[in-house]
Each structure stands twice: as structure tokens, then as C-alpha cells.
Amino acid sequence: MAAQGHGLLSVTRGDAATGFGVTLALGLLTATIAGQEYWQLAWGLRKKDVSRTFLWAGAWFYPIPICIGLLGLVGISLNVDLKGQLGGDAAAVGPYLISHLGLPSWIVLAYVVVVLSACYSVIDSAFTAISSVFVVDVIKPLAPRANERALLVWAKVPMVLAAIIAAVVVLTGADFVTIVLTSYAIRTAILVPLVLALFWSRVTGAGFVWGTIAGIAVGMPVRSHYGELWGSLTILATSSLVPVALGLLNKSRYDFTQLRRVRDATATEGDTREEATPAASQPIAG
Amino acid sequence: MPSALVSPGTVFTLAVGLAAALAYLSFMWRALQRAIRVRDEADVGEDRFQRSFIGAVVAVIGSASAIAAYGLAPSFLYLGPALALLSTVAVAFCLRQEGVDG
């Protein structure tokens, strides 16, 4: 690493932040705040354990990408050719190095197990989240009398569809970094509208929806012309301005306490549960 | 030609990592057993997070310092794996608390 020059790893360099850091940070923040899988965890935990669990698990996750990211730095120090050896996919540097450094086979196998475990962890969270949203927000309103057995069958449908869509995206040949940055840029559009919906009683449903749509519609073309930094900042600014403007025009206030009186959306006919478990609905006024 | 042998530093790191992983799994198993035992009990108690908050601050400052230290000298790159091992120990400690809390 020393041979690459003293400035390579300096935190004062801005190119990493402008190239992908800002987009990645905003996308990760949005993933945590808006991710259905995290909300399911929060609702599944006992009240006394929610803050403790998220603080420990969230904060102590930081060192993991810092550690795994070292493989990229090793790749730089060994002058790995991004186009020639990795096919233009920077995310391939880890597997490439592990399999080309002359490491013992058992370390290569251990690395494969770690990577697959991480993948399966994310995939099963996504599958659980998408099936929950589909059953609660689509099937239950359409078929309120559906029994548990039928709901279980319906819960599997979005998993299969999501798997097919993911496979198609992978088969297009798009590199992993491009997929991640594009999806993160798009999901940034929901960050501010969702935070406002959770904490500001004047946000309207129209403000939320149009803020998200405007953020993507305006920000993505800017991103394609001016790069990650300006694209992400435009998405963030546009998706903030629209819900704030519409919220300021809204005279009514949303009563968050009424969520406590919402009937459990997952309850089936004959179920006596009345205590609120807002499994999918977010507090959006209007 | 790959060899089955690795450096003493790698062996030490793997040994510490293996010990931390075993502790993690053991405490997670106990926490899971307790969660199954008490799952039908009433959801009572205050949200306690003061100690966790201190732990989170330590983790964030440690991670930020590690990234900043990378720019000082290449030898500081080893802070990353050290922090990753520490994170396993920290979460294992949290699971240990979960397994014995009343």
C-alpha cells in the first residue's frame, strides 16, 4: 500500500465520496429506515429490547464492511486491472484476490461460506419482507376472509416472482456496483418523505407519493448526466421539497395516537386481537 | 502453488475469530432458548438502552478512527480485522445479557 503513495488512503480525498460514497451512504441509511425487514424486527421485539437491539446490532456492524473492504485496498496495492482481470466489476475484486493469491484451499472455501451466508441472510430477509407486504397490503384487503392456509400459499408467490426478477437482472450482465448504486440512488427518493411521515403530522399521502416520484423523475436524469454526487443530492432535495411544500399547504394534522386503535391487519375472521400491530401501514395523513 | 500453511499472524487471527464465533453461537443459542421460553409472557418493562448507547458510540468512533488511521500508515490496515473481531465479541456479549436477563 505504501508504494501506491501517501495520499491514496487519506480521508481528505473526496473522490471516493463523490464517486460512490454519498450515494452508498444515503442508500444504506434509507435501507435501514425504510426496510420492511427492519420494521418487522422492531415489531417482533419486546418494547424493552428495541433500542438496545438496534444500537448493538447496528453500530457493531460498521467494522464488518471496513474489514471486508480491505480486499479492495489489497487489489489496488497489487495493481489488479479492473477491466482486464475483473471484467469491469469492482465488486469482483474480493473473490478474484482470494482465489488468486495462492491461499490454502480451506481458506478459499471458508471465504465462500462467509459470502454465501451473507447472501442468504439478505435474501431470506428480503423474501420474508416482500411476502409479508404482499399478504398484508394486497391479499388481505382483496380477500379478507382468506384462511391461514391460503395466506401461506399466497405468501410464497412474491418470493418466486422476486427471485425470477433478480435472476433476470443478474443475467443482463450488469455489473454489481452499477446495480447497487442505481438501486441505492432510486431508494434515496423515499428517505425524506418517510422520515417526514413518521415525525411530521402535516405530511399528506400526495406529498409522500409525489415527493418520491419527483425525486426519481428529476434526480435520475441528473445522475446520468452529472454523476453520482449531483444525482443523489438532486434526488434528496427534490424528494424533500415536494412533501414539505404540500405539507405546509395542508391545514389538518394527523393524529398519530389513532394508530393504537388500528385493528391488526393480519388478523383473520374470528380472531379477537384488537391491539394495534401496524404491520405495514405508515402514518401518512390525507 | 497453494500451501495448506499460513503465517503465525493468520493462525492467531483465525484462533481468536474461532473462539469469538463459538462464544457468539453459544450465547445466541441460550438467547434463543430463553426467547422461546418467554414468548407468551406479557410485553412489559422500560426500553433500556443507556449502556447500549455507550457501546454504539464506542463502535462508531472506533470505526471512524480506523478509517482515518488507514491514511496514516499501511500498518493501520490491520485495525479493520481487529475491529471486526471486536464486533463479534460485542454482539456475543449482548446475546449473553439477553440469555440471562429477567
Image: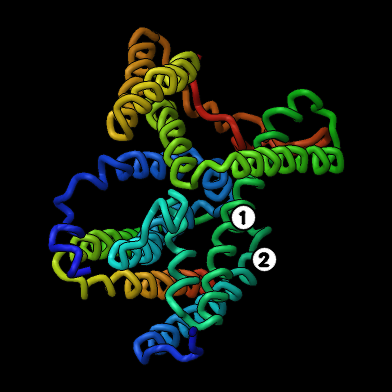
Question: Which residue is denoted by mark 1 in the rendering?
Answer: B42
Q: Residue at x 62, y 29 (%)?
A: A262
Q: Position of residue A89 (x, y in %)?
A: 45, 50
Q: Position of residue A92 (x, y in %)?
A: 47, 57
Image quadrant in which you'd find residue A150: top right
For the residue marked with disc 1, what is the amino acid? Ala
**Can residue B27 be seen in this snapshot?**
yes
Q: Position of residue B55 (x, y in %)?
A: 32, 65
Compared across the picture, whether A29 is left or right of A140 comes to left
How many numbered marks, from 0 up? 2
Q: Establish if B61 lies above or below A189.
A: below
Tag shown at residue B36? 2
Q: Residue at x 50, y 81 (%)?
A: B23
Residues under labels 1 and 2: Cα distance? 13 Å
Q: Residue at x 56, y 69 (%)?
A: A112
Tag shown at residue A11? none
Q: Nearer the viewer, residue A94 or A33?
A: A94
> Earlier along the polypeptide chain: callout 1 or callout 2?
2
Chain ID at mark 2? B
Q: Nearer the viewer, residue B27 or A45?
A: B27
Compared across the picture, whether A79 is left or right of A254 comes to left
Q: Establish if B96 lies above or below A233.
A: below
